[in-house]
Amino acid sequence: ILEDLQHYEQAISVAQKIISTLSEPFYLGGKVISTSTSIGVTYYPDDGEDIKVLLKNADIAMYRSKTQGRGNYEIFTNELSKQIKHAVKLEIRLKKAIAKHEFLMHYQPIFDIQNNRIVGFEALMRWNYKGNILYPDSFLPALEETKMIVEASYGLFLSTFTFIKQLNEQFNSSFFISINISPVQLSAESFQETLFQAIEISGLHPTLICLE
């Protein structure tokens, strides 16, 4: 708690000094330890006069600072509060969507102009929310930020590869499938195993799979 502040900039200056100081590595038990901190700033009485309200506001601002990466601070605003509440509601909905298998793929043909034929498809993730098909810009950033994209995409690999396998058999062709992969998925320990399992179960030849 900072008292007798004349300007908002004073609190920001203190926050920056705390972040800078805690970012310095130090020795503990013969090992070099590195830490970082996230800070939420709220002002009395502008943002509230009740200690519970002020603590909640500071926590909301800190939550946002964490999403910006390590070593950041954020100042509470009413708009920020609305954004955080929306993000929390969306996260709850996405968890339910994963449990109910509401995510699916739409397929966009890839056309070879020179030979005048379809050579493959791009798999595009969609969300069937209460009968409405939602596009990635409304949910994908949240899936990646919360790392739920890993779990959400598990079943989609198998269904996508199976679809292309069946399509190739039906039309006696060799269509390939292109799938966008996020850095969050690539960094997941289970990514490679999940991918290989989907390939093995579907029977689709690996050379027909393009990961972007």
Image: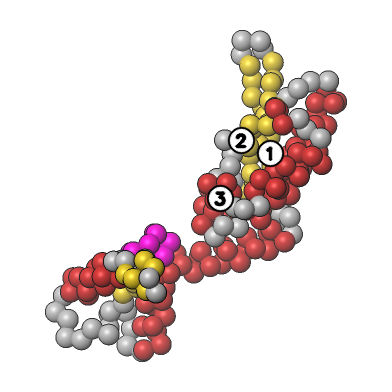
Q: Is mark 1 on a helix, strand or loop?
A: strand
Q: Nearer the viewer, mark 2 or mark 3?
A: 3
Q: Quadrant of residue 59?
A: bottom left
What's under tag 2, amino acid-wise? Leu
Where is residue 138? Give x, y as percent: 54, 51
Residue drawn at 76 percent across, 30 percent down: 205
Kindly indicate whether the residue at mark 2 contacts the one at mark 1 (C-beta within 8 angstroms): no
Q: Is mark 3 on a helix, strand or loop?
A: helix
Q: Mark 2 points at which residue?
A: 211
Where is residue 103? Give x, y as percent: 69, 50
Where is residue 50? Give x, y as percent: 36, 89
Point out the stretch of residues depicted in magenta: 66-72
Q: Is 180 situated left or right of 160 in this image?
A: left
Kindly indicate whether the residue at mark 1 contacts the one at mark 3 (C-beta within 8 angstroms): no
Q: Which mark is residue 187?
A: 3
- Picture quarter with the N terminus: bottom left
- Picture quarter with the C terminus: top right
Q: In front: 193, or 69?
A: 193
Indicate whether 77 appears above or below 154: below
**Which residue in the rendered view is the most extreme toward the front?**
30
| Upstream in sequence: badge 2 or badge 3 | 3
Q: Mark 1 points at which residue?
A: 106
